[in-house]
């Protein structure tokens, strides 16, 4: 069986059972944090329903190969156009779904980041869900079902994907990059359960290099006085990836708290252990907790503005 999915075995098993029992519903919603593997799972599900091999999915039949390559005529992928899924995209989708499948048993539409859909697009999609065409499966992904219209959620079977354990991610990374055990350990911990992020970080050296730059910025800020920190905050506020920076700094301060608690074996940024110990020696637990609360408040505000 073709199976390169990391984690989410329970979800794969569930989807495989409904396919094998020929009880596939017309709409599914996969929720979970960004980069956790929602789109990958949706693609595997699309391959399952049209697979013509002996396993589901086999990964080698024409239908599977085309699905994984993104060339299957009956598998439609809709991604946000800019910042949003827009009404024109849903209208084009409705036209395609009105047609009979060309090669497979069913037409499958994958809509990623449905939480970014405009109200007009959401209402148009709702009409499709209320009167679904025959031989059509809709698979949507979103970070949180609470960001969607309740009427859309109620018409979908929801699968909430959970963070994948670090040791499972590390094993999967080592299977692909056996000569990089140190990077595998670090990335698996930094990933916070996000499989997609972990694989990109291993494949793109820029991601870890940028992390190093962000930690250097944090250390520089800690050395500065109040005026310098205000200037740094103004500079950082202009960055496009401010939320990612906040998450990284949050993990840093959590590591400081772990050192105060004598739990060095649980450090996420364990390649920075010496620098973390210096910070832990210079600030008490209360200061670390205050830093984390400030960062969490910043992250909450950023999430609301996205």
Image (tube, grey):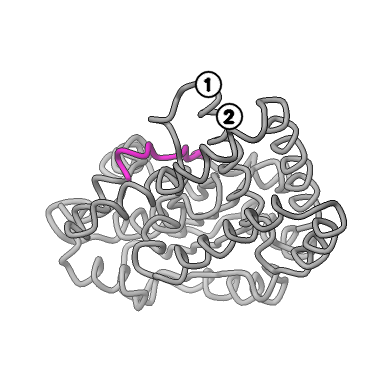
**Residue that sits furthest to the left in the current view:** 54
User: Residue 207, percent across and down?
Assistant: 47, 66
Mark 1 is surrounded, within 10 Å at the Cα level, by few (under 14), some (14 to 19) or many (20 or more) other residues, namely few
Image quarter of residue 88? bottom right
Q: Is residue 244 left or right of residue 277?
A: right
Q: Residue at x 67, y 33 (%)?
A: 283
Note whether 285 is above or below 73 in the view shown. above
Q: Using the image, tell me which numbered label, if any, was put on residue 261.
A: 1
Q: State how far apart marks 1 and 2 are (Cα).
A: 6 Å
Residue placed under numbered mark 2 in the picture: 257
Mark 2 lies on a secondary structure that is helix
Note whether 112 is above or below 251 in the view shown. below
Viewer-side residue, 302 vs 275: 275
Answer whether residue 272 is magenta in the image.
no
Mark 1 lies on a secondary structure that is loop
Q: Residue at x 58, y 72 (%)?
A: 93
Which contiguous range is marked in magenta? 158-169
User: Residue 238, percent across and down?
Assistant: 77, 69
Note whether 205 is above or below 4 in the view shown. below
User: Residue 46, percent across and down?
Assistant: 37, 59
Q: Is residue 157 left or right of residue 22?
A: right
Viewer-side residue, 81 vs 23: 81
Mark 2 is surrounded, within 10 Å at the Cα level, by few (under 14), some (14 to 19) or many (20 or more) other residues, namely many
Q: Are marks 1 and 2 in contact (CB under 8 Å)?
A: yes
Q: Is residue 83 left or right of residue 261?
A: right
């Amino acid at each position: 069986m073709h199976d390169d999915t990391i984690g989410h075995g329970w979800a794969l098993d569930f989807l495989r059972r409904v396919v094998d029992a020929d009880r596939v519903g017309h709409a599914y919603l996969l929720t979970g944090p960004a980069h956790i593997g929602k789109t990958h799972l949706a693609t595997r599900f699309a391959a399952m329903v049209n697979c013509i091999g002996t396993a589901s999915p086999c990964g080698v039949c024409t239908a599977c190969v085309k699905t994984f390559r993104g060339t299957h005529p009956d598998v439609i992928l809709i991604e946000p156009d800019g910042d949003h899924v827009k009404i024109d995209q849903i209208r084009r989708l409705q036209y395609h779904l009105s047609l009979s499948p060309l090669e497979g048993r069913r037409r499958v539409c994958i809509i990623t980041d449905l939480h970014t859909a405009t109200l007009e697009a959401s209402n148009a999609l709702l009409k499709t869900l209320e009167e679904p065409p025959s031989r059509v499966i809709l698979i949507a992904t979103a970070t949180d079902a609470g960001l969607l219209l309740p009427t859309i959620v109620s018409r979908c079977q929801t699968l909430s994907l959970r963070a994948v354990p670090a040791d499972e991610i590390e094993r999967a990374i080592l299977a692909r990059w056996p000569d990089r055990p140190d990077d595998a350990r670090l990335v698996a911990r930094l990933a916070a359960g996000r499989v997609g992020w972990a694989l990109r970080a291993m494949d793109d050296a820029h991601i870890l290099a940028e992390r190093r730059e962000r930690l250097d910025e944090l250390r520089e800020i800690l050395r500065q006085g109040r005026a310098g920190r205000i200037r740094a905050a103004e500079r950082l506020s202009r960055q496009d990836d401010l939320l990612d920076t906040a998450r990284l700094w949050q993990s840093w301060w959590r590591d400081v708290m772990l050192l105060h608690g004598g739990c060095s074996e649980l450090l996420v940024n364990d390649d920075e252990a010496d620098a973390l110990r210096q910070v832990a020696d210079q600030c008490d637990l209360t200061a670390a907790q205050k830093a984390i609360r400030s960062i969490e408040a910043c992250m909450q505000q950023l999430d609301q503005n996205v």
